[in-house]
Image: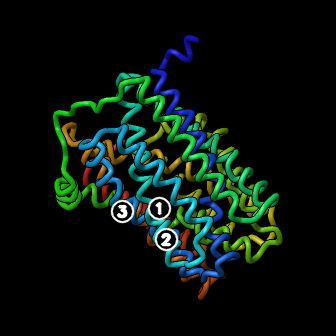
């Protein structure tokens, strides 16, 4: 009972809701590329555009969603978004035209960029400052628990039925969660916190172009995100083309990614506290690049599994440090602005699937060598940022 009293009940509800909705998402989103390839016969380039548009919309949607959340309140944005999101997945199950699928995935990206910041802000509203670091650690764990369960459910459901059913189940889960939240918000009064400083979207853009250190960090983040986006875009297609039962192998790799994160996050986190941020970041990027090289030459399932373990270790080292650097350079009065501006690194998530799709068609044998090189190139920008200000 003491454990349960650590957070406000609404925080526990949102954390468990994160597991529930992320399971729903992981049942379908990682397999969008394969679905488009097998069911709609889309080309790798079109698949890249379809997947990338969600990241592009999420990049700018983060700014807009934050502004609307402040203006209309957490409850309104959360409830409106979750039901629109449910409708998007019904669309995924019924649409047979690739162009409409692109539009739906754009809305999907917007929904995520509205819903997740709003739920995080709501949890912060009900959590004292000294407990917030643990709160986000719990949330990261919740996401990875869902990443273990969701893909396996997706493969199992697809094996028992046609490829559309997982989308309809995801839509139903989102709708159920939305109805549940209506009752929760009636029980607990949810009012937005008052902030002394409110940043407009225009101010966020001004901050980005005025701070050279931030620009270097964003450039490095864009390149890392560009490489990492291959996990959801070209990797499932590449495996599906080159390995028998590729869909099952990819589901294993997604699950393995989450398990490795859950198993190694704590020991690696303790180790990174003993070294500089820059050293941790470089180690992470080197592991990511090594994972790409292994993918490039993999011809058996076991080699892909080894590559995924290496790749995931890089993710654990690098990703927390990318966020830590942004917060480190942010002035005390502009934390929200800098964190909002950090969403620009998601541009890599838009460019990556498009570039990766083109490379998959024309230079398949060099695809992941190129991605390894791009990831390594990001180190230059991080070093330039460090030359402006020594961090960590």
Q: Identify whether 183 is placed above or below 68.
A: above
Separation of disc 1 and disc 3 at Cα?
14 Å
Say which residue label 2 marks.
352
**Dot 1 crowding, Cα within 10 Å, few <14, some 14–19, many 20+:** many
Res 223 visible: no
Is the C-beta separation of discs 1 and 3 under 8 Å?
A: no
Q: CA distance from mark 1 to mark 2?
A: 8 Å
Disc with the residue nearer the chain's start (2 vs 3): 2
Question: What residue is shown with label 3?
Answer: 381
Tell which tag, 1 or 3, sits nearer the viewer: 1
**Which is nearer the eye, 357 or 375?**
357
Residue 276 x/y as whole percent: 43, 42
* The N terminus lies in quadrant: top right
Asked whether 62 or 98 is in front, the reply is 98
- Pick the residue in front: 210 or 152: 152
Tell me the number on the disc at residue 225: 1
Query: Which residue occupies 53% across, 32% down?
Result: 138
- Tell me the tag on residue 206: none
| Residue 344 position in % (x across, y down) | 34, 60
């Amino acid at each position: 009972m003491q454990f349960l009293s650590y957070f406000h009940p609404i925080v526990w509800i949102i954390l468990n809701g994160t597991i529930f909705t992320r399971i729903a998402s992981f049942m379908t989103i990682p397999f969008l590329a394969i679905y488009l390839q097998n069911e709609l016969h889309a080309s790798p380039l079109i698949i890249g555009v379809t997947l990338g548009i969600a990241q592009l919309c999420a990049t700018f949607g983060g700014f807009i969603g934050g502004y609307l959340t402040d203006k209309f309140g957490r409850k309104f944005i959360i409830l409106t978004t979750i039901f629109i999101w449910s409708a998007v997945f019904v669309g995924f199950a019924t649409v047979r035209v690739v162009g409409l699928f692109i539009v739906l995935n754009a809305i999907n990206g917007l929904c995520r960029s509205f819903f997740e910041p709003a739920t995080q802000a709501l949890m912060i509203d009900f959590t004292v400052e000294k407990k917030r670091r643990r709160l986000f650690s719990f949330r990261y764990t919740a996401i990875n628990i869902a990443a273990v369960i969701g893909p396996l459910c997706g493969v199992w459901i697809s094996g028992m039925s046609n490829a559309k059913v997982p989308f309809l189940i995801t839509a139903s889960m989102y709708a159920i969660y939305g109805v549940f939240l209506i009752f929760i918000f009636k029980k607990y009064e949810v009012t937005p916190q008052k902030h002394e400083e409110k940043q407009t979207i225009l101010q966020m853009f001004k901050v980005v172009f005025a701070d050279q250190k931030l620009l270097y960090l964003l450039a490095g983040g864009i390149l890392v995100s560009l490489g990492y986006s291959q996990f959801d875009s070209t990797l499932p297609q590449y495996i599906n083309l080159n390995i028998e039962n590729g869909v099952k192998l990819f589901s294993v790799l997604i699950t393995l990614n989450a398990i490795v994160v859950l198993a190694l996050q704590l020991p690696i986190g303790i180790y990174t506290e003993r070294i500089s941020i820059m050293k941790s970041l470089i180690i992470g990027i080197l592991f990511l690049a090594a994972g790409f090289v292994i993918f490039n030459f993999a011809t058996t399932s076991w080699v892909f599994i080894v590559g995924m373990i290496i790749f995931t270790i890089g993710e654990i080292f690098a990703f927390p440090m990318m966020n830590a650097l942004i917060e480190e350079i942010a002035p005390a009065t502009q934390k929200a602005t800098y964190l909002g501006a950090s969403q620009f690194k998601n541009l890599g998530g838009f460019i990556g699937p498009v570039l990766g799709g083109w490379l998959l068609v024309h230079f398949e044998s060099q695809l992941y060598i190129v991605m390894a090189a791009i990831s390594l190139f990001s180190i230059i920008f991080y070093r330039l940022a460090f030359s402006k200000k020594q961090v960590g």
